[in-house]
Each structure stands twice: as structure tokens, then as C-alpha cells.
Image (cartoon, helix red, strand yellow):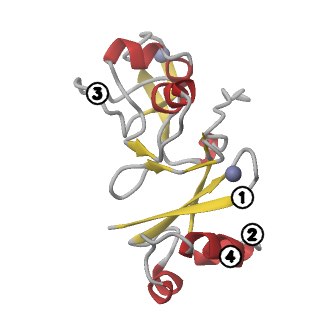
Amino acid sequence: MIVDYIKFKYHPNLAEDEILIRGEGICQCCGKKVTEYIEQDIYAKENIDCLCLNCISDGSAAAKFDAEFVQDAESVSDPEKRDELFHRTPGYLAWQGEYWLACCDDYCQYLGVVGIEELDQFGIKDEVLREYFSHSDSYPQDILEQHLKKDGDMTGYLFRCLHCRRYRLYVDAN
Ligand SMILES: [Zn+2]
Ligand SMILES: [Zn+2]
């Protein structure tokens, strides 16, 4: 079966992301049987462990459970954009909860987890690290070069601006 994925503007690679669970479940919002769903990183009063992508993308799950799917983000001035990110976009898995980066007064697209090796493979290592180290809250360069791994205790989360196309990196450690 070919699944026609719902497109999330800020989360274009959701199909490859670990936050998407493939398995049978019943969506707690619409009650439909689903074969893939979002389980984690749902910030709501109730315990929610199964929401289908439809109910996330149309905002019905966020409204029904008074939920947010993203823990925190850099600030963006347009409240409509904030609404789309927090209430209609699935989060991603991070050590301490996701933090969504922004650029050009809009949220960036989240592309996936990376380590130094992947950045090198994509040919964007220097560009990404230069941008990363321009921020004062960055980890030291030697630590990052040594420990940043896709599956390690220090993970990189790669973002890209929808407007100026600049890459940005968020780093989180166990
Ligand atoms: Zn649903
Ligand atoms: Zn930008």
C-alpha cells in the first residue's frame, strides 16, 4: 500500500522520523483505526498515546485535548505561524524535549537527526557549524566535533530556513 503522506510545512520528513509509529492503533481523537500514528511528545493534560496525522494536521486533536505537540521554540511574530507549529505539526524526539529553531521571522523546517558524519556526507558540515558557533549558547567546538552523533548521547537536529535556505543546528545531550 502506498501511503500518501499528509504534508507538514515545518516537518517535511516526518515519514522518516522516529516520532511516527508504524503499527495498529485507534486514534483517540477521531476513533478511527490507524496503521501509523504519533505517540510521544504530546503536551496535554490527558494521557494521549495515539493520534492520527489527520487529526494533528487539521487541528482537531489540539483543540480536543488542549494539546501542544512541540515543547518550545524560538520566537516568531505571526500568531498564525505559532498556531500551525504548536497545534498542527508533530514534534520530534529530542533528549530534553524539542526546541524548534526559527529564521527570517518564521519557523524553520525540521529535516532530521544528524551527527558530524552526516553533516560531512551532505557536504554542509562547515556551513552548518559556522552558523551554529555564531550563537553564544553553543557547545564548544572540540566537544561537538568529537561527540555529535546521530545515535549518540549528543545529537544534532538539523533545520533549514524556508526563506533564506540557511541551515541551522540544534544540539541536545543526554
Ligand atoms: Zn484521528
Ligand atoms: Zn532565514
Amino acid type for the residue under numbered disc 1: Arg
> Which quadrant does the C terminus fall into?
bottom left
Front: mark 2 or 1: 1
Amino acid type for the residue under numbered disc 3: Ala
- C-alpha distance separating marks 1 and 3: 33 Å
Given contact means CB atoms under 8 Å apart, are the residues at marks 3 and 4 in contact?
no
Q: Is residue 26 above or below residue 115?
A: above
Confirm if mark 3 falls within 8 A of ligand 1: no
Circle nearer the N terminus (1, 4)? 4
Given contact means CB atoms under 8 Å apart, are the residues at marks 4 and 2 in contact?
yes
Q: Which residue is mark 1?
A: 166
Q: Residues within 10 Å of mark 2 (few under 14, many from 20)?
A: few
> Residue at point 53% right, 85% down?
145
- C-alpha distance separating marks 2 and 3: 37 Å
Circle nearer the N terminus (2, 1)? 2
> Residue at point 71% right, 58% down?
166
Q: Residue 14 is drawn in which quadrant?
A: top right
Q: Which residue is mark 2?
A: 122
- C-alpha distance separating marks 4 and 2: 8 Å
Circle nearer the N terminus (2, 3)? 3
Q: Residues within 10 Å of mark 1 (few under 14, many from 20)?
A: some
Mark sitting on residue 125: 4
Q: Position of residue 86 (x, y in %)?
A: 46, 31
Q: Position of residue 84 (x, y in %)?
A: 54, 27
Confirm if mark 4 falls within 8 A of ligand 2: no
Circle nearer the N terminus (1, 3)? 3
Q: Position of residue 157 (x, y in %)?
A: 53, 59
Amino acid type for the residue under numbered disc 2: Phe
Confirm if mark 2 falls within 8 A of ligand 2: no
Confirm if mark 1 falls within 8 A of ligand 2: yes
